[in-house]
Structure formats: C-alpha cells, structure tokens
C-alpha cells in the first residue's frame, strides 16, 4: 500500500490527506518554489473498472493465493436488478464497476487504464 494512501487505511483519514497537502504546499512556498495543483474528480472512475482487469492488476501488485481468491468471487457473477412498483426485473450481468462502499476501489485508480 502506498504510504500516501489515506482513505480506507486504519489510523489514517482523508482529513490527514488534506493536512499533508497543505504542509507540502507551504513547505514548497517556504523553499521559494512554485506550486501547481491538479485535482481530478474520480467519482465515476469505478464505474469503468473491468473486473478481469482489476483481478490482473491485483495479481500484478502481489495479491495472490487466498487473498486474490477472495476477491474473484466477490466481483464475479454479480447481477443488477431493479424493483419498480413491486415488480423485479430479470437482471443483467455486471462485469464492470466496484461495488459501492468497497475498499477495493482505491487500489485500481493508479493504473487500471494502462
């Protein structure tokens, strides 16, 4: 795990990420260097993560054996359905996206589209 990973990490928070950012900015200014910030909205990124690609990336980064074996069934054979006025749709296979609230999401961002 990257040392700069704040969310979904025990003992670290996204508030600490903000503090780290501010400290970096002020430290750079104090060194009389320029600061450039690039901020990206990744809120829909996980909608584009193909499950097979995510499994390959997890393996590439050293997730193997039982750990990887737990992830594959979690992502595979997922179905989405809609309930409207008491009627349920037949469902459609889902092979992209990370389930909401998942702690896997942040792993895929750096290189999922490489």
Image: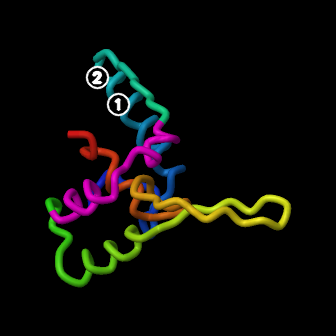
Scheme of colours in the image: rainbow
Residue of label 2: 31
- Residue visible at 58% across and 63% down? 91
User: Left of 62 or right of it: where is 37?
Assistant: right
Q: Is residue 49 above or below residue 34?
A: below
Mark 2: few/some/many CA within 10 Å (<14, 14-19, 20+) = few
Q: Residue under label 1, please give it.
A: 27
* Residue 8: % across, % down: 45, 62
The C terminus sits in image quarter: top left
- Confirm whether the magenta stretch covers residue 53: yes
Q: How many marks?
A: 2
Query: Which residue is farthest front?
Result: 90
Give yes or no for contact between labels 1 and 2 (Cβ–Cβ under 8 Å). Answer: yes
Find residue 12 and report its horizontal and vertical position in percent.
45, 61
Give the structural element (helix, strand or loop) at label 1.
helix
View extreme (right): residue:
85
């Amino acid at each position: 795990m990257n040392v700069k990973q704040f969310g979904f990490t025990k003992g670290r928070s996204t508030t600490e990420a903000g503090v780290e950012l501010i400290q970096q900015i002020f430290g750079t200014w104090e060194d009389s260097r320029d600061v450039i910030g690039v901020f990206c909205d990744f809120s829909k990124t996980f909608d584009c993560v193909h499950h097979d690609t995510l499994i390959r990336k997890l393996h590439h980064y050293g997730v193997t054996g039982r750990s990887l074996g737990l992830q594959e069934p979690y992502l595979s054979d997922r179905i989405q359905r809609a309930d409207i006025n008491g009627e349920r749709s037949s469902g459609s296979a889902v092979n992209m996206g990370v389930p909401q609230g998942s702690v896997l999401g942040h792993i895929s961002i750096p290189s999922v589209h490489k």
